[in-house]
Amino acid sequence: MTSIPAAASLVTDATQPAQSPLRLSWQRFKSNRFAMGASMVVVLFILMAIFAPWLAPHDPNETDLLRRLQVPVWMQGGEWSYPLGCDALGRDLLSRIIYGSRVSIFIGATVIFVATAIGVVAGLLAGYLRGWVDAVISRLVDILLAFPYLLFAIGLMATMGPGLQNIILALAYKEWVIPCRLVRGETMALREVEYVEAARAVGASSFYIMAREILPNILSSVIVVSTLRIAHVIILEASLSFLGIGVQPPTASWGSLVADGRAFIWDGWWVSTFSGFAILMLVLAINVSSQGLRDAFDPRLRD
């Protein structure tokens, strides 16, 4: 016979509202200290990019040849007004790194937003409609995947010319195939489940089924993959700027800062080192936080 305290606890548990899957996933993400710490680093970089005009101690394009390759503050001859030193033209390195975060984060976010929008639509159409639509989209994806990403982007940039807008177009041309393949596979698995067949049986249109029945169930996977791909796009943008076909001077870019310090790697090692360290920190933080998102929101990895 059930005791009164035990019965009371059962009644209490039954009356408590069940937590939503989104809230449970968020709680799992918060319990991951590495992912939360990495997310805070990403947020700090985003805030640094937004408030760059107020955080930068100097104009990033202001030159002073008398301060050419000035050493950082902790070395002999350094000044607190230029804590990370200056580059070969006497420009404040800290200010250029702060403004360079704007370029990297803006290009990464814009490319992923455009590519994800195109990839989700193409993946839904290919996975749900099948037939010739799937054949055309799949063959186009296969053709684009046959080219190495960086070489493909270099070829497009050489054709279109350098510039911020051309970088976004060159990287988005191929980036959409990643979410497209993911969404296509998820859609093919979900198009045969019971609730999709029920919606089809009551006469729901294909657009309604894709938008209301399938897309909400694959959105978490798309967000996780897109977040992870931002780090890859940032590296590609830095690589193009390093090669001189990306963001053009005098606009500050982390890739161009690393390239500017190559000729002074012994006498002015701080120019390339601190710029490369900024790329490393942001990309590593995005990767770790994306891994935490995947562990928290992927139902196949739940404990």
Image (cartoon, helix red, strand yellow):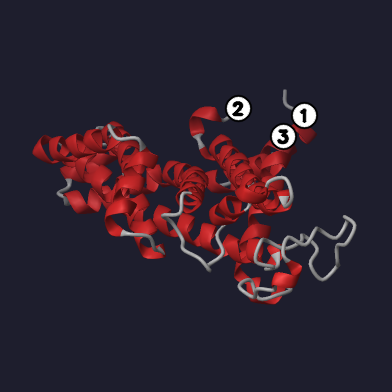
- In this view, 173 is above or below 189: below
The CA span between labels 1 and 3 is 6 Å
From the top left corner, tell me how far across and down residue 44 is, in percent. 68, 59
Q: Quadrant location of residue 142?
A: top left
Q: Residue at x 65, y 73 (%)?
A: 63
Quarter of the image where the N terminus is located: top right
As drawn, the residue found furthest toward the top would be 1
Amino acid type, label 1: Ser
Q: Nearer the viewer, residue 164 or 124?
A: 164
Within 10 Å of disc 1 (Cα), the crowding (few <14, some 14-19, many 20+) is few
Identify the residue position indicated by label 1 in the image.
3
Query: Element type at marker 3?
Result: helix
Identify the residue position indicated by label 3 in the image.
7
Comparing labels 2 and 3, the label whose residue is closer to the camera: 2
Identify the residue position indicated by label 2 in the image.
303
Amino acid type, label 3: Ala
From the top left corner, tell me how far across and down residue 237 is, in percent. 47, 51
For the residues bearing labels 1 and 3, Cβ distance under 8 angstroms: yes
Q: Residue at x 79, y 67 (%)?
A: 82
From the top left corner, tell me how far across and down residue 148 is, in percent. 35, 35
Q: Residue at x 46, y 63 (%)?
A: 248
- In this view, 250 is above or below 268: below
Within 10 Å of disc 2 (Cα), the crowding (few <14, some 14-19, many 20+) is few
Q: Residue at x 70, y 67 (%)?
A: 92
